[in-house]
Amino acid sequence: MSKKNTSQKSKGTVVSIKTKMKAKPAAPKGERVYIFDTTLRDGEQSPGASMTLPEKLQIAELLDQMGVDIIEAGFPIASRGDFEAVSEVAKRVKNAVVCGLARAGEKDITRAADALKAAKNPRIHTFISTSPLHMKYKLNMSPETVLEAVTSSVTLARSFTDDVEWSAEDATRTEADFLCRTVEAAIKAGAGTINIPDTLGYTIPEEYTALIQMLKQRVPGADDIIFSTHCHNDLGMGVANSLAAVIGGARQVECTINGLGERAGNAALEEVVMAINTRQDALPYHTNIDTTLITRASKLVSAVTAFPVQYNKAVVGKNAFAHESGIHQDGMLKNAQTYEIMTPESVGLTQSSLVMGKHSGRHAFKKKLADLGYELPDATFQDAFKRFKDLADRKKEVFDEDISALVGNEMVGMDDKIQFRSLTVISGTDGPQKATIVLDIEGDEQTRESTGEGPVDATFNAIKAIIPHTGRLALYQVSAVTQGTDAQAEVTVRLEEEGRVVTGRSADLDTMVASARAYVSALNKLVAKRETSNLSIVDSSGV
Ligand code: KIV
Ligand code: ZN
């Protein structure tokens, strides 16, 4: 593992600003706030949000491209899948620091170090609870033993890398004097970043600002390290608390795309970054994030996890830039600033545009994909092009959303063992409904016919007849990609099997075809997950 200290304070790094002319980039305003994204770790811990390796890699690459400073890629001791994810992300990420989480024990820390071996800039993030409640009931450890564990865990982590982050889990419910002692011990042992998590989303902004200020004033060595904030959203104050910590002196914000995360989620990256950008008067800081990639990241995370983004969600919700009332629309027409504090373009939201018709060629399709941010390997591109032509033949108008829905799942299904071939369904008032499906299982084409309580049930039964499994259907959801009766149906299927949760998605003009494809996609992920099942179970001292 290379030993690079990546936790130095900013010395005025320049943010790249896209302008039409090649003007000199504007100097960044205020101090740098580092963005630590934990979508792949804390985000994935949220029930039902589990992701496959290709999905995690796709997200990690986009986060890297966005300018995220630190990507927490997983919790390597938790499972073979987590270990692989951290090591693969470590291999691919070009700019960001790649971080692996570890509890305070030797096994966790060495496993994290192993997973990070290939990282250009590796960080080990080790943590232990410090609140009286957690120490007594969760850890069954005395405060003195916890203090010793802080020193030994950070010391061990530092033997693998110079970049070590230490977290005081449940810091906001920890006694101030004890918190100071643990932070001091972590700094002395060599941690360059000290994280003060609001694990339960319990704090309020003023209190949290004061907590960071108190630590900076009281703890010896505090000036030489970066304080970090990690806020959960249980009382809806995750973002407000994160910004309050920055005001108090924290210079790293831990957050997730769409605010994904345990329980009510973590602070949302897009909200933190856009608040800093929009309110420079009150928040004179800067980040390295290319905000025009925010919408893409939000859509990708939502598609992969099948967690819909609520319509009125700040920054990335469908209605975030919509103006319905007449008074607002009138104001907008006169001057957009009357009802808009940031522009849709600044978060990468473009007008839904009509794409191409059935005469559009490969070149135009490739260009459109690039504009939408997709870069497909050749085989996948050919398949996507065929499906696009098919769609354009059948649908009058093809929009950007149609293209995104069409290719969004192609990208993660490239190496699938089970391939959908065709489906015929008989439905209507006079049952039983019947489905005949053809699947290709690693080159072996198989056909089955089944009946069911409705066409979806019949289709899924036919698939099950070819691939018997014990996965429980936990979610079946259909939505329209665009408007009109010729809109594509986007179907999400979630399966659960022995604690493994997988989600498949697909879009097609035919709802039944989209359903079958989504089900097959989920099954492929289940097969992949079975192969990387848990090595160790996170015990009661886990996160
Ligand atoms: O919420 C929390 O305290 C955590 C820590 C592991 C940082 O996720
Ligand atoms: Zn957390």
Image (spheres, rainbow, N blue to C red):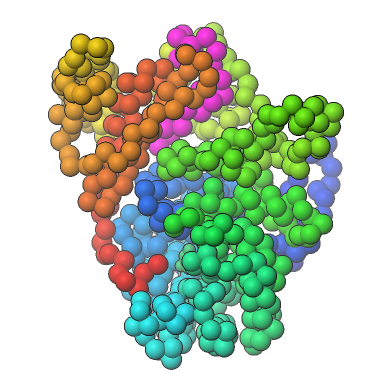
- Highlighted magenta segment, given as a residue range: 391-413
* Image location (x, y in percent) of residue 338: 81, 37
- Identity of the residue drawn at 34% across and 65% down: 77
> Residue at the spot x=67%, y=45% of the render?
291
Q: Quadrant of residue 9?
A: bottom right
Can you see residue 301?
yes
Q: Residue at x 54, y 47 (%)?
A: 258
- Is residue 459 visible in the rendered image? The answer is no
The quarter of the displayed image where residue 190 is located: bottom right
In the image, 360: left or right of 433? right
> Is residue 470 within the magenta segment?
no
Q: Residue furthest bottom?
A: 144
Q: Nearer the viewer, residue 337 or 119?
A: 337
Residue at image coords 81%, 31%: 331
Horizontal side of residue 30 vs 535, given as left or right = right
Q: Tell me residue 83's x, y (percent).
A: 36, 59
Can you say whether 517 is above or below 537 in the image? above
Q: Quadrant of the C terminus?
A: bottom left
